[in-house]
Amino acid sequence: MIKGLKSFFSKFRKLFKKKKKIKLGLYGPPNGGKTTLANRICKDWLGEEDAMGKASNIAHETREIQIKEQVVIKSKGRELIFNLVDTPGIATKIDYEDFIKAGMKQKEAKSRAKEATKGVIDAIKWLDEMDAVVVVLDSTKDPYSQVNITIIGNLQARDIPVLLVGNKIDLKKSDIKKVEAAFPQYAVVGISAKTGSNIESLYDGLFKLVK
């Protein structure tokens, strides 16, 4: 993990020498907590509630790219400026029947599935615009999923600096060690975007990049 952090920070130091502001993308599978984290960041540093839209227990609530510009984090005389990009959840398969099971009517379910599919395609395309990516995973679930491997593979192929976030550490089933073991090449930070637990570790990690 330490080796992964050093590599991650080294890439970012080089990046920040060239740029004063970056595009920071939040990626991950549906319901991992991307929007909740995006809202937490906006609340902490911009004072805005639900700036990136409301989160939902139903998958693919976020179906379009959401951008919050000029997010400024300050601490101990340091300043970090970035455009925060919240992306639709990545999925390898989207079936409208899953939305029907969640309580939607058929017409709405088919529309949601169509929009969600487009959202996934757009999210992958936007990877080429990202300077860095925070991958948000549900730490209560098995990290060795086809979706997660697909996301990581796309990031590796583009050589994009990555920080993994194991979200939902407030839940009993959370297991950060499994996330670390699944992707040892990356630094992992365990947080609860919902409660804000250990969120400072995420912010501290971002500041270490510009030293």
Image (cartoon, rainbow, N blue to C red):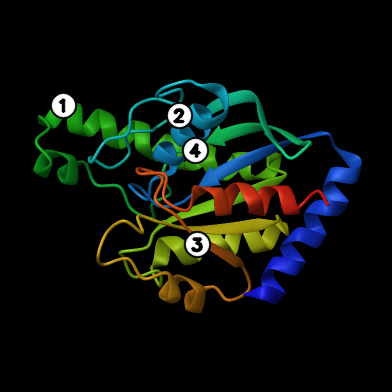
Alpha carbons under labels 2 and 4: distance apart? 7 Å
Alpha carbons under labels 3 and 1: distance apart? 30 Å
Q: Can residue 3 be seen in this view?
A: yes
Question: Mark 4 Cα within 10 Å, few/some/many (few <14, many 20+)?
Answer: many
Residue behind mark 3: 150
Q: Are marks 2 and 1 in contact (CB under 8 Å)?
A: no
Alpha carbons under labels 2 and 1: distance apart? 19 Å
Q: Which amino acid, mark 4?
A: Thr
- Mark 3 or mark 2, earlier in chain: 2
Alpha carbons under labels 3 and 4: distance apart? 15 Å
Residue 96 is situated, as x and y percent measured from the top left of the image, at 21, 41
Residue 172 is situated, as x and y percent measured from the top left of the image, at 25, 65
Q: Which amino acid, mark 3?
A: Thr
- Mark 3 or mark 4, earlier in chain: 4
Q: Which amino acid, mark 1?
A: Lys
Question: Which of the numbered marks, if any, corresponds to residue 107?
Answer: 1
